[in-house]
Amino acid sequence: MTSSTQTSLPLMEHFCTLQGEGRYTGQASYFLRLGGCDVGCVWCDVKESWDATQHPQVSIEEMVDRVLQSGVAIAVITGGEPLMHNLDSLTQGLQEKGIRTHVETSGAHALSGQWDWICVSPKKFKAPLPSLLSVANELKVVVYHKSDFAWAEEHAQSVGPDCMLYLQPEWSKSDEMLPLIIDYIQSNPRWILSLQTHKFINIP
């Protein structure tokens, strides 16, 4: 893990788009995708993010400026696994400029940074920390197999009472899993369907 005085981070890509998943679906957001991941999901669609050394170190000041220039009010820090890095300075810089800070994490690393919204998407490949689940605003479980419903319920027991619960079909198995998710939510209405709308409308 990097030091809290870190002045730069490995940035794989950055772009302004609409949030495609979860609670803030459809809202304009600026994504900062950091390099580095040790979770290793077999169905990951950004495996090129895994090796942090393959991506340039970009200053936190420059990243904050890019978000400001976009004019949007939400910065989404994602990866890879963003919490492999200390994000205190990045989130402080964004919040000082009035930008909301959202993180998308597997929950496998300790929390750093100051967040307006924490989305934890637990993975079987490396289990989330209880401390991350307890502060999650959103639990988003990717359903790849029928057994993932039990996995989802297991982790829903560890989040707070106000945490929003989402089930999202893994993209390549959506035709198979989506009908099962719909049936499951009808029987378990505290869960909400999340779709990767950015893929349907062909935006980043």
Image (cartoon, grey):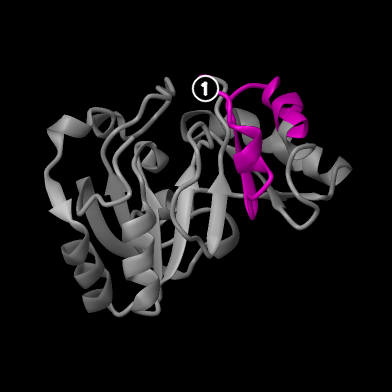
Instruction: Please indicate, yes or no, whether residue 204 appears anywhere in the rendered image.
Output: no
Q: Which residue is pictured at 58% across the width and 33% down the height? A: 122
Kind of residue at disc 1: Lys
Q: Which residue is mark 1?
A: 126
Residue 53 visible in the picture: yes
x%, y% of residue 192?
71, 51
Q: Residue at x 16, y 31 (%)?
A: 53
Q: Give x and y (percent) for residue 15.
A: 25, 60
Q: Nearer the viewer, residue 108 or 110?
A: 110
Depth check: give the residue in front, 20 or 200: 20
Q: Residue furthest right?
A: 187
Instruction: Please tell me whether residue 28 is drawn above or below residue 117 in the rendered image.
Output: below
**In the depicted view, which residue is nearer to us: 84 or 40?**
84
Q: Is residue 132 magenta?
A: yes
Q: Is residue 139 left or right of residue 50?
A: right
Q: Secondary structure at mark 1?
A: loop
Q: Residues within 10 Å of mark 1 (few under 14, many from 20)?
A: some
Residue 165 x/y as whole percent: 71, 48
Which quadrant is home to the N terminus?
top left
41 w.r.t. 137: above or below: above
Residue at the image position 34 percent from the left and 54 percent from the top: 202
Magenta residues, as a range? 125-154
**Does 147 appear above or below 14?**
above
